Image: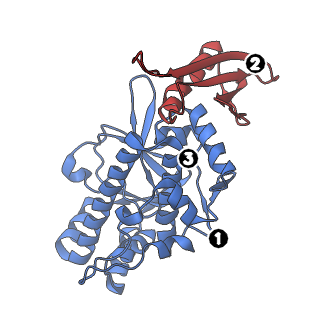
Amino acid sequence: MPHHYFDVTDEDRFFRDETGLPCPDEAAVRDAAIRALPTMARDVMPDGDAHQIAVRVRDGDGRYVSEASLTLTAGSLDPESES
Amino acid sequence: MANPLFRKLSDANTLNDADRDILDKVIARQRTVAARRDVISAGDRPKDVHLVIEGFACRYKLLPDGQRQIVAILVPGDFCDLHVAILGEMDHGIATLSNCTIVEIPPATVDDLTMNHPRITRSLWWATLVDEAILREWVTNLGRRPADRHIAHLMCELYLRLKAVGLVIDHTFELPLTQQELADAIGISIVHANRMLSDLRDRGLVTFQGRRVRIADFDALMAFADFDPAYLHLVPRTENGLQRDLADRGSH
């Protein structure tokens, strides 16, 4: 089964996946990338008004073939507020 | 003969040589089970009580979509189903994570221990209560701890439980878990688990060498994981309520 590698970008931090995961087809690749996001987002400490986590998937030849991302946004609804 | 059951029970319970002889007989009937097989499946009504003597196993629940949650890791000296004779049928499965040696204890032996050996009976009760305490800690980890702390917490727990049965050598223990199995225990995806493992490696808290885990600085890992070993109840209850310093156990 072909291995795919799931690199994670958490704001400005990049984690290169050296282990990989066997994925039988494109749907499995997409599924694994999406499934990774919610629990990673749960662990994020909000450090601003927006926080993005992205998973980019490489195939065995090093080509990026798929991407999924999740953005947390926060903002004040008070018109007097600066931010 | 190495008897991890005696070793585990005698740490926190007062047992004597006669008790040891009895527990040596208890573990006499052994069989090997290959890695990644069910020892007992959900719905089974096992007649014998099972005990892990060698290797790693886990308790797990399966979801309809095929996902699995590992709810306990069993190490040498741990019972699989001490009270299944009372409860009737298994509400979860038990599978090996590595090649295992499993003991099958006939119901007559369990009855004999209960009727005639109060010290051993009390220590089995202790073992059951500790299993529950570990489960409470796992629930807390699953619900509230970030994944990196959760993994670190599990490594601290395994370190102390394996140390109690003599399976930590030079700060290192065997951990035959795949990344998928670790993810199933932590309740996260394998991609997330891989990321957290590389995080712990980068922080220098845990070294993974193939199927071996090395924890050079246990105190640092404990601090990172917010780990308090009290729930493992590894020290005997004493009359004056004072307990030996648990941190001693981790640091060497």
Q: Chain of mark 3?
A: B
Residue occupying image coordinates x 64% and y 24% = A55
Q: Chain of mark 1?
A: B
Q: Nearer the viewer, mark 3 or mark 1?
A: 1
Q: Are marks 2 and 3 in contact (CB under 8 Å)?
A: no
Q: Report x, y in % for residue B250.
A: 51, 70
Residue occupying image coordinates x 69% and y 29% = A7
Chain coloured blue here: B
- Rendering colour (chain A): red
How crowded pointer 2 is (Cα within 10 Å; few <14, some 14-19, many 20+) is rated as some
- Residue B118 is at least partly visible in this image: yes
Name the residue type under label 3: Ala
Q: Secondary structure at mark 3?
A: loop
Whether residue B128 sits left or right of residue B5 in the image: it is: left
Question: What is the CA distance from the residue labelled 2 to the residue labelled 3?
Answer: 35 Å
- What is the quadrant of residue B169 in the picture? bottom right
Q: Are marks 3 and 1 in contact (CB under 8 Å)?
A: no
Name the residue type under label 2: Tyr
| Residue picked out by circle 2 | A64
Q: Is residue B90 above or below residue B65?
A: below
Q: Secondary structure at mark 1?
A: loop
Q: Report x, y in % for residue B25.
A: 37, 73
Name the residue type under label 1: Asp
Q: Which mark is residue B170?
A: 1
Q: Report x, y in % for residue A6.
A: 67, 27
- What is the quadrant of residue B106 in the picture? bottom left
Residue occupying image coordinates x 28% and y 77% = B237
Q: Nearer the viewer, mark 2 or mark 3?
A: 2
| Extreme residue toward the left, this view | B115
Q: Chain of mark 2?
A: A
| Residue picked out by circle 3 | B35
Q: Report x, y in % for residue B222.
A: 51, 60
